[in-house]
Every structure is written in structure tokens, then in C-alpha cells.
Amino acid sequence: MLAALERELATLNTDVGIVQTQYATWDEPLRLKSGVELTPITLAYETYGALNACRDNAVLVMHALSGDAHVAGRHAPTDRKPGWWDAIVGPGRALDTARYFVICVNVLGGCSGSTGPSSLDPESDRPYGARFPIVTVPDMVAAQVRLLDRLGIQTLHAVIGGSMGGMQVLELAINHPDRVRLGILLATTAQHGAQQIAFNHIGRQAIMRDPLWRGGDYYGHEPPAAGLATARMVGHMTYLSEERLQWRFGRELQKAEELSFAHGSEFAVESYLDYQGNSFVGRFDANSYLYITKALDYFNASDGYASLAEAFKHAQARFLVGSFSSDWLYPPHASEEIVAALQAAGRDVEYITLESPLGHDAFLLDHERLTPIIREFLTSTEESGARG
């Protein structure tokens, strides 16, 4: 009992507490990679800790596909769960808010406060739906650079992200090299291959073939919940490892002791996926899923350069690259390709591979091992001139 109380108190002492989402809006158009000019633009973001007098202690956290700006803390004391990376952000944690000013922004095209397909089109005063222009990872990052300018932050101490977040780290470090000193990439890739594109295509087709999608104009009507839930189930499977699934579910039946010989969900793993799909529908927009997965498929860190190594010659940051042994969405060899290109470009890079049964989700779940690694990388370079 005493040990449990001590753990609870320790959590309270390192929690960022109650946080509030903030919003920044620009009337100046943002020219997207497609050539379309988008205006107005709103970004939802949250901050933790305090910006120092020199304005050089900011750490930007880039979220993954289904994430948002709420990386830590709670919006209200009654919230059932804290932010999606709460174990990493807070006083004394890897991203120590007693030391760093931590920022997390909901990406352009998202559905958690930033401008996206569910936002009102000023020309029609109706939600954009599928009329929203295609956005890319470079567009998402360009919008966040605008926010940095508004906050008066010229250079970030660090930028960190896993999965899609890691792609944003690459884009910022390569094409906005003066904005970042340290780049931390976890469980990510420099570009999608055929397998990743194929899985995303299946998810998008599940949504667009749902008759309730209505060509993207389902706002004000029943949403394409079945399509989005199916897309989430397909995507979620790529986040898990076979070992984790077998250990957790095996062939266990959810309720009955015998097979029902019917078409319902009776295996425990089926019920788990049903839950994941249904809960996702309650917090995410189907059109945003289409747009963000398309942005992932379009991303190529070497776009505009002769090679990835040539792209990295423009970067000025030191890098930490991390992968996980059982991640089959972005396997260790994807990280190793990034590391090899960084080394070929003469960049300063550290690489770690963690043995883990957790699959792709390890970057979100394995915080106990990630914390000392991230903390050491951030603090070991603070006085050493981090530019490569």
C-alpha cells in the first residue's frame, strides 16, 4: 500500500497538471506544395514549461498520425487519461518542463483544432470535406514554422517525433536547417515503400467505399463510422507485433468457452480490434484520416535532392535515431538507412536499436527505457555547440 502511494505521489510531482489548448490564426495564405494557397489557417497547440530569456530552450514534439497537440497533462481533473506522451513530458521526465519549453502542434489537415477538412470553407461557409486541398508533410512543417515565428523562437533546442512525427523532424531539419539544433527520430522512415502505401490505401478505400462517406460531404449527417473503424483496425494491426498479439490474445475466446460457429466477433483479438476501431471513430475525423495517410505516402525526405545523403548535407542538427526490433511498419533497416545517409553526409548521429516485443507502438509505450536515452542526448550537447 505504501509503495503504491509513493508511486502515485511521484506521478503527481512530475505531472504538468491542467493544460489548455491554444490557437493561432493567420489570414496570410500558405502556399502548399500542390500550388494551392490556403487561407485562413488555424493551428491548435499546447505548451508546457517556460520559455527562457534567450528563447533557446524550446523543444518541439511532432505527433504521429492519430495524435494531436495534447501531448501531456489533462484538460480537466475529470479526464480519464492524460496526453498521449505524458510519461515523457513533465518535471524530471525526459522532456523536463523545469528545463525546457515544450510545444506540440496539431498538424495542418488534422481534426483537433487545426485547419483541416472538417473546418469551414470561407467561400461556402460549409465544411471543406473533400474540397480541402491535399496537404503534405512539408506543408505541415511550414505551418509550424509560422507558429515558431509568432512565438519568437528562431532556433529550437530540439525537435522530437516518432512515426509520422519523425518524418516531420526530417523535413524540419533538412529544409529549415537553421531552426533546429538537435533532432530525435523514433520508429520512422525517410519514405514509404509499397507495403506501407498498400496498407494506407486499404484504409482509405474502406472509408471511401462506406456509403455514408458521401464523397466527403458527410458533415451534418451520420459519419462513415464503419469505414473509419475498419481503416483504424487495419492501421492498428501494423502498430503491433506478432509476439505481442500472441502473448496477449492467442486463440482465446472473448466470452464463450466453445466456438459459436457464427460470423460474430468471438476471439479476444477480434473484440480488441472492434474496440480500437469503435473508440477511434469517437475522436477522429474520417476525412482527416484520408488526408494524413496520403501525406505520409507522398513524403520523401530526399525530395528535391539527388539522394538522402545529399539532403542531409543541408542539415545542421545533431541526430539521435532510434528503432525497435519488432517494429514491422518501420523496421530497424528503415532507421539504418537514415543513419547511413547521415553518416555519408558527415552529420553527427547516434543510433540505438531497442529489443522490444511491443512493435511500432514501442515509441509510445517503452518510456522507461527511452527516458534516460532522450535525457542524455538532450543534456550532453547543451554546452557543446550542437551544430554539425
Image (tube, rainbow, N blue to C red):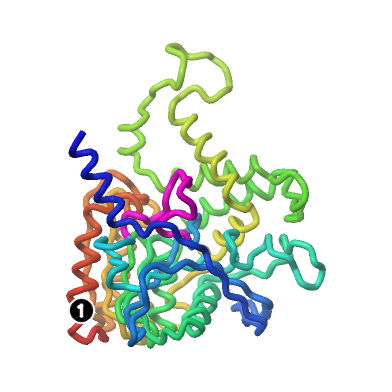
Q: Which residue is mark 1?
A: 381
Name the residue located 23 percent from the left edge and 58 percent from the top edge.
Answer: 353
* The furthest residue to the right: 124
238 displayed left or right of 129:
left
In the image, the segment drawn in magenta is: 70-88
* Magenta-colored stretch includes residue 85: yes
Residue 337 visible in image:
no
What is the x, y in percent for residue 195? Answer: 46, 54
343 displayed left or right of 268:
left
149 displayed left or right of 33:
left
Q: Quadrant of the N terminus?
A: top left
Name the residue located 28 percent from the left edge and 83 percent from the top edge.
Answer: 345
Residue 9 vertical position relative to residue 2 in the rendered view, above or below: below
Q: Residues within 10 Å of mark 1 (few under 14, many from 20)?
A: some
Name the residue located 55 percent from the left edge and 75 percent from the top edge.
Answer: 139
Residue 320 vertical position relative to residue 266 in the rendered view, above or below: below
What is the x, y in percent for residue 337? Answer: 31, 68
Residue 353 visible in image:
yes
Q: Nearer the viewer, residue 346 or 88?
A: 88
What is the x, y in percent for residue 343? Answer: 24, 78
What is the x, y in percent for residue 351? Answer: 22, 67
Q: Quadrant of the C terminus?
A: bottom left
Residue 79 vertical position relative to residue 188 in the rendered view, above or below: above
Q: Quadrant of residue 306?
A: bottom left
Name the residue located 46 percent from the left edge and 43 percent from the top edge.
Answer: 80
Q: Nearer the viewer, residue 347 or 149?
A: 149
Circle 1 — which element?
loop
286 displayed left or right of 170:
right
Q: Quadrant of residue 217?
A: bottom right
* Magenta-colored stretch includes residue 86: yes
Mark 1 residue type: Thr
Q: Main secondary structure of the magenta part?
A: loop
